[in-house]
Image (tube, grey):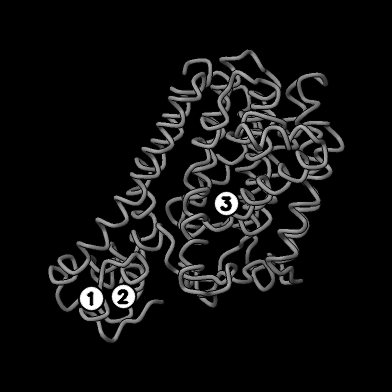
Amino acid sequence: MQTLFSLLWFFYPAALVSLVVSIIIVLTKNLHIGFTAKGHAGLEIQSSHMVPTPRIGGIAFMAGLITSLFLVSKETGFLAMVMLGAAVPVFLAGLAEDIGIGASPKKRLLAAMVSSLFMILLSGYYVKSGVAPGLDYLLGFAVIGGVFTIFITAAVCHAFNLVDGLNGLAMSIALLASSAMAIMALQTGDFPVAFMAGAIAASIAGVLLLNFPLGKIFLGDAGAYTLGFLVAWTGVLLITRNPEVSKWAVLLAVFWPFMDTTAAVLRRIRKKAPIGEPDKLHFHHVIKRVIDVTLSSAENNTIANPLATVAMLPFVALPPLLGILTAQSVSASLMALAFSICMYFAIKISIVRNFRRIGRAAGERVSAPAQQPLREVASNEGHLSRKEEPSQQAA
């Protein structure tokens, strides 16, 4: 752990640059807010914010990463340089959406796939084995292995965008994931991957200081997708360069976006709704809704959002910690993954089952709109029957 702190401190100039750029964006927001707050003025169904806020924190994040390239030797920084170059398509696609030019989710996902294809062609790395006995044989074929790698990395990109719904949540997840991967890389002596992970953690920390708790700046699609791309590819490099590191331990590092997105896909399949349809039933939305109904309306606007992030952090941090502890054992990391999945659903089910009690305690402060999302979750999870809630059909 001391080595990790030393690594993060090594990249403090990157954190400083991302912080300074974030401050500049916030101080000059009156000059650009008309086209840098698209989609975060309470107009989207999944939005948790009502005040127009610059969502171009991805620019500050990239500024920090570019700074980090000047802090290491060419040999050590080569992989970081390749990753940043490959990330350009997904960054530009996200930025186009952030400033109002427009890039649909399909286009952004396609851009993530293009970036991953570039990464494979430039670096030569892709997942070849260690997933499952039957699948490992197929992954041995370059085309199949490459397609599989493109799919999983693009999925992580999209997953990070989906969990970017509360102040500091996606950045905290990325900070924990990259720190966990840095420790795993240091344990194997893979310093290029460790330095890349450290650069990601330091660069996102600078933006996090202005995003949490008051939400002065948001990552936006450029930041969230690029962050997901870099974290995903740090994981791919870690397991392909170091076969002794369990793939499942790396999955634990990015467990929360992986699990929350998987749950969302299953939920929409059950509802027979389009998989890409947005909603406010993600885990962080449920947590925030519980906090909303227990606070007065005056308190809601200022503390419910960051408080929901704080409430989630212990659960978000546990899987990466388990990943570090089980990184050298496939069986142990699989058990830890199974435990984390059970924990995820157990917590969500417990929240839904106790929502009525919370609502009664909140009394008149609980409005019908506030209760609706959790009732929808309960309906989807099957914990409230139609007989009990005749007016609430499956969402």
Callouts 3 and 2 close, C-beta under 8 Å: no
Mark 1: secondary structure: loop
Q: Is residue 390 above or below residue 116?
A: below
Q: How crowded is mark 3: few (under 14 residues within 10 Å), some or many (20 or more)?
A: many
Taking the view exactly as shown, the residue that stands out farthest to the right is 121
Residue at the image point whose x is 78% and y is 41% from the top: 146
Comes first in the chain, label 3 or label 1:
3
Tell me: 22 left or right of 167. Answer: right
User: Number of numbered discs present?
Assistant: 3
Q: What residue type is labelled 1?
A: Val
Q: Which mark is residue 370?
A: 2
What residue does disc 1 label?
A: 366
Callouts 2 and 1 close, C-beta under 8 Å: yes
Residue at the image point whose x is 33% and y is 61% from the top: 304
Find the distance from the CA under tag 3 to the CA under tag 2: 25 Å
What residue does disc 3 label?
A: 160
Most foreground residue, 283 or 144: 144
Comes first in the chain, label 3 or label 2:
3
